[in-house]
Image (cartoon, rainbow, N blue to C red):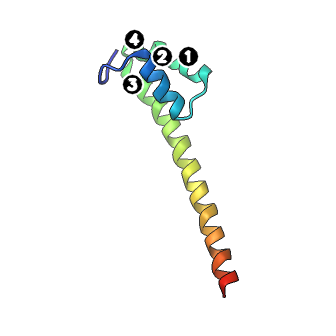
Amino acid sequence: MFGNNQTIEEVKQNMKDAGYTKEEIDAFIPIWQSGNKPESMRLLSKQRKVLLQSIHKKQAELECLEGLLTTVRG
């Protein structure tokens, strides 16, 4: 185990809050518990990338909407 001494339940909750499925959490916990930092980082970075892509997609949608609002306002 590594990090800031989080309990398994805290890690699970944090992962749930970050959008992980139960299956993904259950697969991650043994890796985290084993202290395999490279694999843990790889898996966490993968989810980070997914979340960033989602944010960028929503940002683009918002920009499109802002353009429509500007057009309608005249």
* Cα distance in 3D space between marks 1 and 3: 18 Å
**Residue topped by disc 4:** 34
C-alpha distance separating marks 2 and 1: 6 Å
Looking at the picture, which amino acid does disc 2 mark? Ile
Residue 22, compared with residue 34, is above or below; it is: below
Mark 1, mark 4: which one is toward the viewer?
Answer: 1
Q: Earlier in the sequence, mark 2 or mark 3?
A: 2
Mark nearest the camera among 4 and 3 is 4
Q: Are marks 1 and 3 in contact (CB under 8 Å)?
A: no
When the figure is inspected, residue 58 is found, relative to residue 72, above or below; the finding is: above
Residue appearing at x 61%, y 20% in the figure: 23
Asked whether disc 4 touches disc 2, contact meaning CB atoms under 8 Å apart, the reply is no
The quarter holding residue 11 reads top left
Question: Which numbered dot is residue 55?
Answer: none
Quadrant of the rendered image containing residue 35: top left
**Marker disc for residue 29:** 2
